Amino acid sequence: MSAPVRVLVVDDEESLRHMLSLSLSKSGYHVWTAASGQEGMELLRRHDPFDVCLTDVRMPGLDGLAFIQDGLQLKEAPTFIAMSAYGDEQLAVEAVRRGAFDYVSKPFETDDLTLKLRLIVERRRHAHPHKPAATGLGKSAAPSFRAPPGIEEVVSVSPAFREVLDVVRKVSRFPTTVLLTGETGTGKERVAGALHSEGPRASKPFVPVNCAAIPDALLESELFGHAQGAFTDAHSDRAGLFEAAHGGTLFLDEVAELPTALQVKLLRALVEKEIRRVGDSRTIAVDVRVVAATSQDLGAMVKDGRFREDLYYRLNVVRIELPPLRARPEDVRALAEHFVRAIGERLGFRAPSIAPEAMKILAGYHWPGNVRELENVIERALVLSDHEGRIGAGDLDERFDARAPATATEDLPLPVEGDELSLKVVLPRVERQLIRRALEQTGGNRTRAAGLLGVSQRALLYKLKEHGIT
């Protein structure tokens, strides 16, 4: 049997080390932690080789950038993933340029991190198919690939969503390109996983990538790989996500965020079924089923010249619209019960549950952040509950308090001065007000705030910079 992947977590924040240790251990990884770069370097030198190292980029003493550089000089270096706080994205990008495989921005979802670890396993297996260690990293062998949940594991009782799953069941048998549309947080990645798992590619890799979460300067190399010497610090050939997904499914989330130059290259890959690594003259044949997703109106973007028409029609062969949670209220109870069991088990509660009065409040909420918001609400309530895993009405946050200010757009006072009615003047003020309200409501969590606003994380970052919001 394959040995678990060995992961080292290096961060000066104790709560983060503890959280990652618990969640990754439950996912089957062997986890060590270090409170500083110096302590992490000692572990790298003294212990058997680690497969992956998660490190903060900003630490006292030996910072993350220097730690990564020093670690890569070791004979059996791990694959590094940099962790950055809000405002440190440029440091994280610099870490990737210095040799880190990828980066994640805090706060992040542990499920997203687990997917990145799985991706490392899959792309190393593809790059080194004959090595005993599937990661190609050190001596440890990687866990075998597990397909994402199928249709039967998707939680839904509403007729609207069951119709979506009926279409998924029909389309999954074919390699046809699928475009998933709908608001942020409606479950597009879960549906993409079901498309993969229900079809003949289920035993092959399912590789998800969020196009909005990767800087433009790195996205082409991430998708298509690069050749040795293609740019500074490209010390060796590197396979991209298309190659990692060979034989399986590549899920392109937030595809509307692709820069125009990459849209051209993606179209060529879809048409010709071959890719070319950055800096390489050779082409590589790939057998990949592409599922794309977006929360934006691609048709409108085509009209505005922001998205290529030919790529839009290539992606939009079969379009599946996912209804928002408010359009399928029957699913709120089913999803809440599912999340309280799953999250409660992960957090160590023996019999987690939701009191009837709390369930009534959840059922009456409008859920602008959809399923993702519901999941976050359940986890927060379980963590802060004083009732050992039983969520009561008092454990829900202020957005469910009848005494709290309304959050609907029509209840916000319009920021107008005098008789000023110009949309060019007033709308930016409204946008700024809504962004600040979303950040306040989510405690500054940009991921959740973007979900409430119905935009991608990258779009929110642009808006924060545009309005000077820090």
Image (cartoon, rainbow, N blue to C red):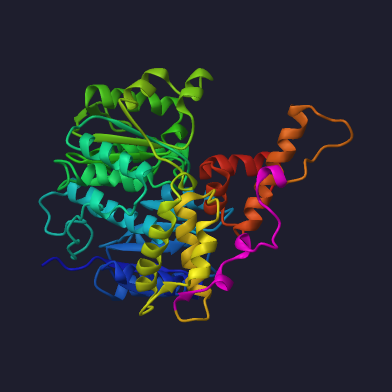
**Location of residue 372 in the rendering, given as x and y in whole percent from the top left corner:** 45, 53
- What is the span of residues highlighted in magenta in the rendered image? 389-411
**Location of residue 347 in the rendering, given as x and y in whole percent from the top left corner:** 39, 74
Quadrant showing the N terminus:
bottom left
Residue occupying image coordinates x 24% and y 52%:
152
- Is residue 172 at least partly visible in the picture? yes
Is 174 drawn above or below residue 43 in the view shown? Answer: above
Q: Nearer the viewer, residue 244 or 49?
A: 244
Q: Give the quadrant of residue 135.
A: bottom left
Total marks in image: 0
- Is residue 63 at least partly visible in the picture? no
Query: Residue 414 vs residue 127: left or right?
Result: right
Query: Residue 117 vs residue 307: left or right?
Result: left
**Location of residue 203 in the rendering, given as x and y in whole percent from the top left corner:** 14, 48
Query: Residue 449 vs residue 342: left or right?
Result: right
Quick check: is 408 in the magenta stretch?
yes
Residue occupying image coordinates x 36% and y 71%:
346
Q: Nearer the viewer, residue 13 or 333?
A: 333
Quick check: is 162 in the magenta stretch?
no
Residue occupying image coordinates x 58% and y 45%:
453
